[in-house]
């Protein structure tokens, strides 16, 4: 078990969020051999190490992610860092919201997805880091008549100040697609408002074609009208805490 205590000098001692514990809680390895290539649905072979953070920093965090692995190998010396797996969240600039349950428990779990080990391997070790985004105030960047903005970069002072570039790739009947470049951490939520300013419910996901950029897609429960507004909710003045990860000699299943 490894522990890390992190301080934010900008906060008073009584408000200092800390990560009192960083530990591995599970190692899982899946191996798949594709026998018929034309019936293949992708290579699902992987090694997953699940870690856990505990402490007041989890309680105060709004988002977590930007998971990085700088070293990962088994005890035969095989390099396990996954570089081209789209489904892996490792070494990709991506942040997720911390949910209410995780805050209440002051525990946050995360998965590190790696390549499978050598058949003769018995143990695995890795080093890296994960970011927590703490504090900040919610501000809105609104874009009226969003249908007319398809194919353009969304320009707003709050986006520019946080180093975020968003290109609205496509606006369809009830869906939008966009790409993000730059600091994605402070981007908290993307909302569609109707003419009356009421939020339109929807679902969100991501996809990528080949080695192209990650595209974010939102599908809404009703049609995007000519007077609909796209609202980008941002966390202004939030602090990023980078938590080091170092797991050594974890026994393989």
Image (spheres, rainbow, N blue to C red):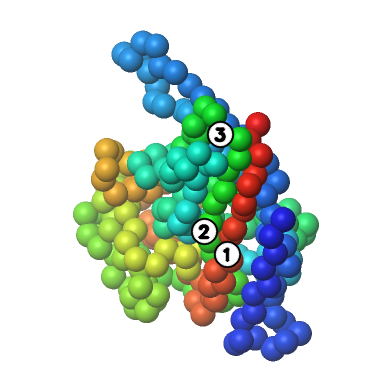
Viewer-side residue, 13 vs 204: 13
81 above or below 68?
A: above
Viewer-side residue, 225 vs 168: 168
Percent across and percent down for residue 238 are 54, 76
**Quick one: label 2, few (<14), some, or many (20+) residues within 10 Å?**
some
Residue at (31, 65) in percent of width and height: 165
Given contact means CB atoms under 8 Å apart, are the residues at marks 2 and 3 in contact? no
Percent across and percent down for residue 87 are 44, 39
Q: Quadrant of residue 57?
A: bottom right
Q: Which residue is mark 3?
A: 121
**Quick one: label 1, few (<14), some, or many (20+) residues within 10 Å?**
some
Q: Which residue is mark 2?
A: 128
Percent across and percent down for residue 112 are 54, 47
Q: Quadrant of the N terminus?
A: bottom right
Percent across and percent down for residue 221 are 48, 41
Q: Which mark is residue 244?
A: 1
Residue at (69, 60) in percent of width and height: 2
150 above or below 83?
A: below
> Among all residues in the image, which is located at the extreme left?
151
Given contact means CB atoms under 8 Å apart, are the residues at marks 2 and 1 in contact? yes
Q: Secondary structure at mark 3?
A: loop
Closer to the chain start, of discs 2 and 1, is 2
Q: Secondary structure at mark 1?
A: strand
Viewer-side residue, 161 vs 69: 69
237 above or below 200?
A: below
Label 2 and label 1: CA atoms lie apart by: 6 Å
Q: Taking 175 as reference, is 29 left or right? A: right
């Amino acid at each position: 078990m490894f522990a890390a205590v992190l301080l934010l000098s900008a906060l008073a001692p009584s408000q200092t969020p800390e990560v009192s514990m960083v530990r591995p809680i599970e190692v899982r390895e899946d191996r798949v051999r594709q026998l018929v290539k034309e019936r293949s649905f992708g290579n699902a072979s992987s090694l997953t190490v699940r870690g856990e953070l505990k402490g007041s920093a989890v309680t105060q965090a709004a988002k977590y992610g930007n998971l990085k692995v700088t070293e990962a190998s088994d005890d035969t010396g095989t390099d396990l860092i996954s570089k081209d797996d789209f489904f892996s969240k490792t070494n990709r600039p991506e942040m997720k919201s911390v949910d209410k349950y995780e805050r209440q428990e002051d525990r946050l779990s995360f998965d590190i997805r790696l390549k499978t080990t050598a058949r003769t391997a018995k143990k695995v070790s890795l080093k890296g880091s994960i970011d927590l985004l703490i504090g900040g105030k919610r501000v809105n960047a609104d874009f009226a008549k969003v249908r007319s903005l398809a194919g353009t970069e969304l320009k707003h002072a709050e986006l520019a100040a946080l180093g975020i570039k968003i290109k609205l790739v496509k606006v369809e009947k009830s869906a939008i697609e966009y790409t993000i470049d730059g600091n994605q951490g402070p981007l908290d939520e993307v909302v569609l408002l109707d003419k009356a300013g009421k939020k339109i419910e929807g679902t969100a996901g991501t996809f990528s074609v080949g080695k192209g950029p990650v595209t974010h897609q939102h599908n809404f429960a009703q049609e995007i009208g000519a007077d609909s507004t796209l609202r980008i909710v941002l966390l202004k003045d939030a602090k990023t805490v980078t938590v080091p990860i170092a797991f050594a000699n974890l026994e393989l299943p």
